Every structure is written in structure tokens, then in C-alpha cells.
Image: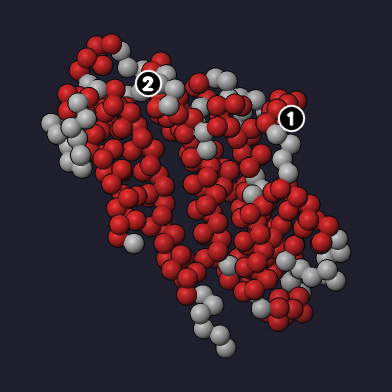
Amino acid sequence: MGLLALLCILPLVNILAVSFSSPAAASANLVGVWPIGFTVDAYAKTLENDNFLRALINGITRTIAGTALSMALITLTAYALSKDNRDFRGRTFYMWTFVFTMLMHAGLVPTYILIQKLGMINTLWALILPQAVNVFNMILLLNFFRSSVPKALEEAAYMDGAGHFRTVFSIYLPLALPAIATVSLFTMVGQWNSWFDGLIYITKPQNYPLATFLQTIIVQRDMSTMNVSVEDLEQMSEQTVRASQMFIGVIPILLVYPFLQKYFVKGIVMGSVKE
């Protein structure tokens, strides 16, 4: 486990070291896990880049809105499909309809045409709505609801006059908080790291989310979005600027995880003791 942890941590440490290193050391690939010729010029230039800051805001907005919408939809869907056939007529049909979408996909061209006909090109909805209902995450919540929420507790709520929405928010959500926190993190990371849809549906670079913005400068090496002049490149390395942008892009997810860690621990021990 320690070796696996190092495999995950060392690349991040190397990127951090490169971002704080001098241009000469970074260009010569001399930087390991410790900066050489410490400097913060790359971060100063990154934070002065309007394109990067705009992409960062777009990425945060897309992640928050996408995660909130996705969790609302898959939680309500999982609650409905967790019922028995006698409580929800047609449950089997709807369940297989969702499963079918995991096995078959219309393809990129029909999906693009649909997004275009709906007028969502160059809008945030093109990045959020197609991923709003993740069937795999919905099935995880569905199985958790069926196995971890006592049927007697739900029936007691109905006897007290609670409806479906009151039951969801007062019983299911508190009991399923570890599972919801885990699925929320999966959804959040997926939204934050998704770059391909932004490259397809967003034609204006100023509307790129951060993941798409980083893809254009790292993979495609499109330096026009970096807002770095020739004079700046003479004083700093292209590698240090890219490294600083990549590390800043990781920070939001690193900040979210500590708040969800306790729910992961609770989720691990949940179900280990049976009455």
C-alpha cells in the first residue's frame, strides 16, 4: 500500500517541484522531488492569466452545478427503483431501460446533433445535462438503499403520515450519507476532470472549463491560451508555467477530500456488525 501511495504521490510532488524551479533546471529535466532555483514566477504569471482564471471559474461552476443536479436526480431515481414491484409498477421495465443505456450508446455524432438541435452548444448545459444521470452511481445508491435502510423504518414513517419526499429527506438521506458522500466525490471528480466534452461542445476558448483548457496547452501545446509573451518565455520555462497550472487544477479536489474522508471510514465499517 505504501508503494502504491508513492506511485500516486510522486508525480504530483514532481509537478509541484517543477512549478517552483528555475527555467533552466526545468528545461534541462533536472528537477526531481525538490525545486532547483526556487522561484514563484510561474504562479505569478498563471494568476495573471485571464484565460486561466476564467477557465478555473468555469470548471468550478460546472463541477458544483453538475454534481448538485446529478446527485439530486440519481438519488431520487435510486429511491424509486429501490421499491418492490408491488410498490412501484413497471419497476423492472424502468430498471432495464437504465441498464440498456450502459450497454448501448448512440455514438458521438448523434449526441452532438442532439446537443446542437437543443441549442446548448457553447453553454454550460452541454457539459452538465448529458452526464446528469450516471447509471452506475445510481445502481450503487439503489443497492445501498435496498440493503441498508430497514423496511420497518420506512413503514413507520408512512404510518406517521410521511410522504415519499419526507421519507427520502428524513430517513434515506441521513442513513445513506456515507454512500452519498462517496458517490458525490466520484461525480465531482468526473465533472472536474472531464475535458473531451468541453473540446467538442465548446467552440469558444474563453468558455472552456479548466480540464479542457489544460488539455489544449499540455497535449495540443496550444500556447495561445496561456497568454505568455515571447519576453516572458525567455525569463521562464514553458514547463514551469504548465506545471503551476496543473497543480492549481488539482487543489480543489484535494481540499474537498478531507471533508468526505470521515464518511468513507464510516462506510467501511457500516454493516460489519449485525443485530
For the C terminus, the image quarter is: bottom right
Q: Is residue 115 visible?
A: no
Taking the spot 51% from the left edge, 27% from the top edge, the residue there is 208
Please say if 204 is above or below 156: above
Sequence order check, earlier mark of 1 and 2: 1
Q: Which mark is residue 226?
A: 2
Q: Which mark is residue 110?
A: 1
Mark 2: few/some/many CA within 10 Å (<14, 14-19, 20+): many
Percent across and percent down for residue 149 are 64, 74
Taking the spot 71% from the left edge, 82% from the top edge, the residue there is 152
Q: Answer left or right for 257 relative to 36.
A: right
Q: Which mark is residue 36?
A: none
Q: Is residue 98 visible?
A: yes
Amino acid at pointer 2: Met
Please say if 163 is above or below 130: below
Please say if 178 is above or below 274: above
Percent across and percent down for residue 26 are 21, 28
Q: Answer left or right for 82 relative to 266.
A: right
Percent across and percent down for residue 109 are 70, 27
Percent across and percent down for residue 196 are 55, 32
| Discs 1/2, front | 1
Taking the spot 58% from the left edge, 32% from the top edge, the residue there is 197
Q: Give the image's coloring scheme.
A: secondary structure
Q: Answer left or right for 271 relative to 6.
A: right
Secondary structure state at the residue bearing disc 2:
helix
